[in-house]
Amino acid sequence: MREHRQSYGSYSIGCAVVWAAILGVLAARGERKKLRKILPVFGGWCMGWTSATIARYVYPPAKSRPPWRHDQGT
């Protein structure tokens, strides 16, 4: 169960829930000025999340080095 909580999918779902709550509260309270300020931040976060998701899909994870090579810089 612990591995499931530390996955990228869980992170993505958690972020979506938090952003939905933030935007929903601002919209429900009718705070248009704050909503206009936070929407570009949300858009930037979406672009960053999208590029990170593409990078995780396209590039393979790094290979771990053998234990005898951990002390060396290469």
Image (spheres, rainbow, N blue to C red):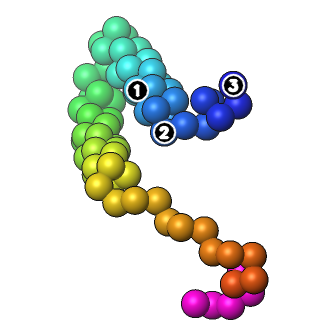
| Residue 1 pos. (x, y %) | 69, 25
At label 3, the amino acid type is Met
63 or 50: nearer the eye?
63
Residue at the spot of label 1:
16
Q: Relative to the observer, which residue lies in front, 23 or 52?
A: 52
Residue that mark 2 sits on:
8
Horizontally, residue 48 falls left or right of residue 61, namely: left
Q: Give whichever of discs 3 and 1 has the lower sequence position.
A: 3
SS type, badge 3: loop
Which of the two labelled residues, at mark 2 and mark 3, occupies the earlier sequence position? 3
Magenta-drawn stretch contains 20: no
Q: CA distance from mark 2 to mark 3?
A: 14 Å
Where does the magenta region start and end?
70-74
Q: Position of residue 61 (x, y in %)?
A: 46, 59
Residue 53 x %, y %: 33, 46
What's the distance in space between the residues labelled 3 and 1, CA to CA? 21 Å
Query: In the rendering, at what x and y percent does residue 3 appear?
Result: 65, 34
Question: Which secondary structure, mark 2?
Answer: helix
Name the magenta segment's main secondary structure.
Answer: loop
Q: Quadrant of the C terminus?
A: bottom right
Q: Residue at x 50, y 35 (%)?
A: 11
**Residue identified by numbered label 3:** 1
Task: Look at 25% across and 23% down and name the residue there.
Answer: 32
Amino acid identity at mark 2: Tyr
